[in-house]
Image (tube, rainbow, N blue to C red):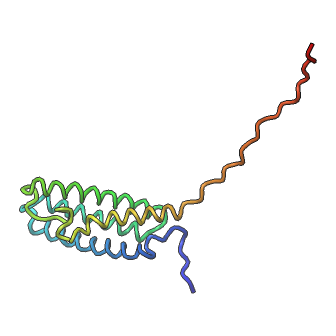
Amino acid sequence: MAEVRPAGADTARGPGRVLVALYGVFALAATSRAAVQLATQFEQAPLAYLLSAVAAVVYVVATVGLVRGGRPGRRTATVACAVELAGVLIVGALSLADPAAFPDETVWSGFGRGYFFVPLVLPVLGLLWLRHLSAQNSPPPPKSPPPKSPPTSPPTSSPPPP
């Protein structure tokens, strides 16, 4: 028997499955990395390790939003992808501009160069996929009523010319 899914719960179908898998892997990897770094090496690079923890939270939220699907899930995933993209761009730029502030790498350092730039590409793909789904799931625009014909005025009787 076919599985019945609620309308709009399609974020994890088709290419969305790949996104869910990638976000799931990054959520697990970033969470594990941040937990180890915070527990054992926090004093060496507190900013970098706290940013790794923030990245982990963002990846978990994005994964949950994509898995959840529907309008609320898409909204959650969209916010998470936007935050991730902003984080990658800001942390990437700062890590290159001031390497001393980042004595150890984060997931987003150097625009994700330690992860083959997947952290830079992933939110862009996620946002594109979510935009595609929103356009696909939005109701068609309402039909506009036909144009009204100009009002007709009753013929006026004009006096005959002299």
Find residue 148 and report its horizontal and vertical position in percent.
74, 42
Question: In what quadrant of the picture does the C terminus appear?
Answer: top right
Asked if 80 appears above or below 7 in the picture, the reply is above
Left or right position of 21 against 32:
right
Asked if 147 appears above or below 66 in the picture, the reply is above
Residue at image point 66% right, 50% down: 144
The residue most toward the bottom is 1
The residue most toward the front is 162
Find residue 145 and report its horizontal and vertical position in percent.
70, 48
Q: Looking at the picture, tell me which residue is in the foreground, 64 or 20.
A: 20
Find residue 11 and report its horizontal and vertical position in percent.
44, 70
Residue at image point 10% right, 69% down: 40
Residue at image point 52% right, 64% down: 136
Q: Looking at the picture, tell me which residue is in the foreground, 91 or 143.
A: 143
Which quadrant of the figure has residue 81?
bottom left
How many numbered tags mark residues here? Answer: 0
Asked if 109 appears above or below 98 in the picture, the reply is below
Q: Looking at the picture, tell me which residue is in the foreground, 130 or 80.
A: 130
Which quadrant of the figure has residue 95?
bottom left
Question: In what quadrant of the picture does the N terminus appear?
Answer: bottom right
Residue at image point 21% right, 73% down: 32
Which quadrant of the figure has residue 59?
bottom left
Find residue 18 and report its horizontal and vertical position in percent.
37, 76
Left or right position of 11 against 138:
left
Left or right position of 121 against 75:
left
The residue most toward the top is 162
